[in-house]
Image: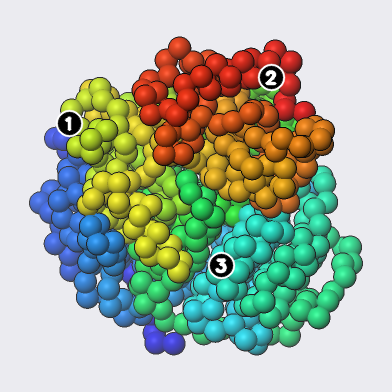
């Protein structure tokens, strides 16, 4: 490998600046240092940016001159083999999205080698295993060696640059090494959340045409054993492209090994702990991550190398006020984008110590998070509102019992955080002294796009609001006619009008679908699928999805997927699924089903429908409510009016809005009375 300019890493950045930044008020913690390094001797810092960086100034600069903002940051934040010649070449009208063109680098070198050169024994990962008190610390040197052994194993088993590898594992150092091993050799990983069923797994493996699957024999979650390998066995029967299954061991139990299966640790032991990194183009694929949309099957969003890495590293550093030496605790699963960006890539690129949380918030009891914070001395804790809502019901003593003085920043992600959970997190967990950031972003955005920080040190944070766009994120709210809404105190469709380095580049194998899903509704803008409210001060509050995507405990799910899973039942000609409010999970699926006239016992069918959804998607997708109706409300052109169903089940039947397109208005009373009976029975659909 050509000598890499390791001098360009974060190590060259002077200590994080604090204190008054001059006449414009508080200096942004960390930003000045970041930009001073970025605009160093070779750069052309905008006048005053380095000395007196204020949030509005920097925000404006990033919006108006994205190349001047991101170019120097990329140059000095990342380790390059070959410098880029063009910062960006993007056009949201045509879906052209290119960043740092001409540049070459290796993501695993950025996440590992550069830190190993400087401090090999610093801790990269603390694996908080399911069994409390048994954490394992892994140094940057160890993680690099493990990654290289795994990379060499992949190569020996025929994985080449550009090939896709499925990772179906629980949160563990080996799973992180598997991701980085792919990055090292230029393979494309697709991590599939270990809660997905065999059929879901197979669907994703087939869409990505994966050559290899990496998994565990079994995994532990909340003290229970999950038979991961058995699920993989079932899935790969349906996957003609899979040549090998690499099986690692999380438990001592033996599992059946078939003709595709290779014992991973045994193979890795034979390999060299050194593996030359592939030099990748900035826009080569780094990973695919499947996520639900409002129509069709989950889509494989493509993230590429340089822009994604830079965006996850810079947001990690600035939104959470990450400082060298901190222990960063993001409790997300690596199967979701939060795990990719804020457990693996962002923290490791910044040389942080990142916690891998394998367990659940209530195992062995409701004090698990805070006992972990105390034991590992976590400085930033990043989790999901669903867990906070659950924990607050257990009472404050589970929190107060543990020392949380190490905490400096608390973060929330994945769904709207309600006021009660926000206050609890702030007052009880954070003792009113931690910065609490409600962060809004998506699988598609690669990293955080709206959050209360960065901003001037000490700037106000309003409860339950993501508030401020990150640098380079230019937001627009659209009205029903597709016109940009100006001013404050307005609600509309949340769009982004300019590309940023972390944006997904396409949907794997289907660029047309990518364009239709994100760029068609408002030409020239990226449409997020969410609605938002803008206050008079210009702060943003997310109001929720505007499409047929629902959010169950922070897990994104397309109602169309659930409908498809149920419609495969021979007794069910039609279904409609909507999101139904739930005090802990946020939303749960509520299914309306029409049964064929000659269907026998409807309770039996309902049980079968539940089991269909669990096998075809995942347990979390199983509707909490299944209501049998004679027919569904449709427009004259045959489109199901889910909007009306939502109004009926949320008690807003008096305010149904425009119903003139309804084919037969009498259906409203029909469904309302079926729903009232269902509710009066206190039924959960059984
Ligand atoms: O509806 C928004 C919600 O989660 C969606 C994105 O889901 P996913 O791609 O799975 O990524 C989740 C983790 C980044 C968004 O379209 N969402 C995410 N964060 C928030 C949120 N809704 C409200 N407030 C948030 N902070």
SS state under label 1: loop
Residue under the image location 64 percent in, 46 percent down: 567
Q: Is 268 placed above or below 482 here? A: below
Rendering quarter of residue 604: top right
Rendering quarter of residue 486: top left
State which mark lies toward you, 2 or 3. 2
Q: Which residue is mark 2?
A: 678
Q: Are marks 1 and 2 in contact (CB under 8 Å)?
A: no
In this view, the residue in front, 652 or 582, is 652
Rendering quarter of residue 211: bottom right
In this view, the residue in front, 328 or 185, is 185
Crowding around mark 3 (Cα neighbors within 10 Å: few <14, some 14 to 19, many 20+) is some
Relative placement, left or right, of 34 versus 398 is left
| Dot label at residue 236 | none
Q: Is 532 placed above or below 449 here? A: above
Q: Which residue is mark 1?
A: 486
């Amino acid at each position: 490998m050509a000598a890499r300019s390791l001098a360009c890493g974060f190590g060259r950045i002077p200590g994080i600046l604090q204190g008054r930044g001059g006449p414009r008020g508080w200096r942004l913690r960390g930003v000045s240092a970041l930009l001073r390094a970025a605009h160093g001797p070779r750069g052309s810092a905008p006048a005053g940016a380095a000395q007196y960086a204020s949030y509005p100034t920097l925000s404006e600069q990033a919006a108006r001159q994205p190349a001047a903002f991101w170019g120097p940051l990329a140059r000095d934040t990342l380790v390059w083999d070959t410098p880029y010649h063009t910062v960006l070449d993007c056009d949201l009208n045509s879906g052209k999205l290119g960043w740092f063109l001409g540049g070459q680098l290796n993501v695993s070198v950025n996440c590992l080698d550069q830190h190993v050169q400087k401090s090999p024994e610093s801790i990269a990962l603390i694996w908080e295993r399911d069994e409390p008190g048994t954490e394992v610390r892994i140094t940057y040197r160890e993680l690099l060696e493990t990654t290289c052994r795994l990379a060499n194993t992949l190569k020996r088993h025929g994985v080449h640059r550009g090939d896709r590898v499925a990772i179906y594992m629980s949160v563990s150092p080996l799973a992180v090494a598997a991701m980085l091993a792919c990055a090292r050799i230029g393979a494309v990983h697709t991590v599939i959340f270990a809660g997905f069923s065999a059929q879901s797994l197979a669907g994703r493996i087939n869409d990505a045409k994966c050559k290899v699957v990496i998994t565990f024999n079994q995994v532990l979650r909340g003290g229970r054993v999950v038979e991961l390998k058995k699920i993989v066995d079932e899935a790969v029967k349906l996957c003609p492209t899979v040549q090998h299954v690499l099986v690692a061991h999380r438990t001592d139990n033996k599992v059946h090994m078939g003709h595709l299966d290779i014992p991973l640790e045994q193979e890795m032991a034979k390999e060299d702990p050194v593996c030359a990194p592939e030099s990748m183009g900035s826009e080569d694929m780094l990973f695919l991550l499947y996520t639900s949309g409002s129509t069709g099957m989950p889509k494989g969003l493509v993230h590429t190398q340089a822009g994604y890495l830079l965006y996850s590293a810079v947001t990690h550093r600035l939104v959470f006020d990450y400082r060298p030496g901190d222990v960063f605790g993001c409790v997300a699963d690596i199967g979701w984008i939060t795990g990719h960006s804020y457990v693996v890539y962002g923290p490791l690129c910044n040389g942080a110590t990142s916690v891998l949380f394998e367990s659940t918030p209530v195992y062995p009891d409701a004090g698990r998070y805070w006992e972990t914070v105390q034991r590992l001395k976590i400085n930033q804790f990043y989790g999901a509102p669903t867990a906070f809502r659950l924990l607050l019901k257990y009472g404050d003593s589970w929190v107060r019992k543990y020392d949380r003085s190490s905490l400096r920043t608390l973060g929330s992600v994945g769904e709207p955080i309600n006021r009660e959970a926000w206050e609890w997190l702030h007052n009880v967990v954070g003792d009113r002294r931690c910065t609490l950031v409600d962060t809004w972003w998506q699988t598609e955005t690669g990293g955080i796009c709206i959050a209360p920080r960065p901003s001037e040190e000490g700037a106000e944070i309003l409860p339950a609001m993501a508030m401020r766009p990150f640098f380079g994120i230019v937001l627009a709210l659209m009205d029903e006619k597709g016109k940009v809404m100006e001013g404050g105190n307005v609600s509309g469709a949340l769009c982004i009008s300019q590309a940023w380095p972390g944006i997904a580049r396409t949907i794997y194998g289907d660029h047309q679908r990518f364009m239709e899903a994100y760029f068609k509704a408002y030409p020239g803008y990226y449409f997020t699928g969410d609605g938002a409210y803008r206050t008079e001060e210009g702060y943003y509050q997310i109001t929720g999805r505007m499409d047929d995507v629902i959010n169950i405990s922070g897990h994104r799910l397309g109602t169309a997927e659930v409908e498809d899973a149920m419609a495969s039942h021979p007794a069910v000609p039609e279904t409609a699924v909507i999101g139904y409010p739930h005090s802990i999970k946020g939303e749960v699926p509520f299914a309306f089903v029409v049964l064929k006239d000659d269907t026998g016992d409807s309770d039996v069918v309902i049980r079968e429908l539940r089991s269909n959804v669990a096998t075809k998607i995942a347990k979390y997708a199983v509707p909490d409510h299944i209501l049998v109706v004679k027919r569904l409300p449709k427009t004259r052109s045959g489109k199901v009016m889910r909007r009306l169903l939502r109004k009926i089940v949320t008690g807003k039947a008096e305010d149904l809005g425009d119903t003139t397109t309804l084919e037969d208005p009498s259906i409203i009373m029909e469904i309302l009375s079926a729903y009232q009976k269902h509710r009066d029975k206190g039924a959960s659909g059984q």
